[in-house]
Amino acid sequence: MIPSPQHDIAGVPLDSMATPMPVFPGHGAQAGSGPHGIRRIGPARRAVLLFGTVTILAACGDGGTAGRAPEGICRGESLFGRPSSNTGLDASQCTDTCPDCDGGPFSPPAYDEAFVAGLRAWRLLDPPSPVHANPYDSPPALPAADTRVCAVRIEDPEERTYRLETWPGARAAAEAGAIMTHDGACGVCSDLESLAVYAEVGDLTQPVRRCAVVGLLLGEERNLKCLYRIGFNAACASIWYWNTVNTRAACQDLCLQQVGDPYHTPDGALNDCLRCDEERSGPVFKAVAGRTRRNSGLATALCRPCAEVRPLSHRYE
């Protein structure tokens, strides 16, 4: 008997995600505060915080991995990624190949412009709503181990419509004719439009940096509109925004000390700022967003141990 998929978004009902609620408990909005209780700051202080914020943003969208699905895994501590000038590592330390995976070495395909355009041509039925309330105030359940996967169910190939379904594992999804799109439960960034952004932009730091400038100077609404221009839809952009708010609160002082530092230290570890983001904001981001770059098998300028990467090639035609 084929199990039925779970249609919720990472255990969080869509209507509850869209319900406004107070944020930063105990620190409600006061005179001189902006949206969601974020205090307004002067231009000089904005400039200082900006540099810390853009460093923080390098890890957004790549939340920690709580557990592994039993089918199709990689092993080992070899670093997987595509280093950029911001990475701090070279190709001898980080490559886009994981040598020890089920079925042999894993290297993601080259996702070209035609592939990205094809992803954007698909239309998700019943898409999730934006996250209007700060999910870090009431975090969703974070399982110690998670074997679920998010899969695409093609509804009409001619109209290019699809639905997203959470399945207990990759094998169950495949047996039901669904196409796995990432490890873990579906969330607000699980759609193919968000996958197109992740596949197209190997290092999101620079475009998100511009959005941070806009947000700090002009507020939340303009920050979100800037994220839309990168390619994110309203639902996915909303969790990127909340991740930034939480990491700024949790890691700001640490990140201000590492302005301009490479993402990685010479031994391959994340720098202290990005590690703080990983630990303090990553788990909730992953639970709400669903899709991250590493659980989708995408190589980026942030290098990750192969054991945290899902070996996955994307094809939805």
Image (cartoon, grey):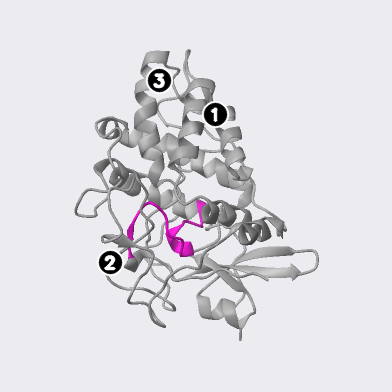
Looking at numbered disc 1 in the image, what kind of residue is underneath it?
Answer: Glu
Q: Residue at x 60, y 73 (%)?
A: 179
Q: Nearer the viewer, mark 2 or mark 3?
A: 2
Q: Residue at x 39, y 81 (%)?
A: 102
Q: State the SS at label 2.
A: loop
How far is the residue under mark 3 from the one under mark 1?
14 Å
**Which residue of the protein is positioned furthest toward the right in this rendering?**
158
Q: Is residue 259 magenta?
A: no
Q: Which residue is mark 2?
A: 78
Viewed as shown, does residue 219 lie left or right of 7?
A: left
Q: Which residue is mark 3?
A: 46
Whether residue 196 is visible, yes or no, is yes
How far is the residue under mark 2 from the one under mark 3?
39 Å
Viewed as shown, does residue 81 lie left or right of 155?
A: left
**Crowdedness of circle 2 by 10 Å Cα count: few (<14), some, many (20+)?**
some
Provide residue 310's location: percent of width, then percent of height.
Answer: 43, 68
Region of the chain picked out in magenta, as a range:
289-305
- In front of the other: 35 or 98: 98
Could you tell me what secondary structure mostly forms the magenta stretch?
loop
- In front of the other: 283 or 43: 43
Provide residue 142's location: percent of width, then percent of height.
Answer: 41, 57
What numbered label is drawn on residue 220? Answer: 1
Mark earlier in primary sequence (2, 3): 3
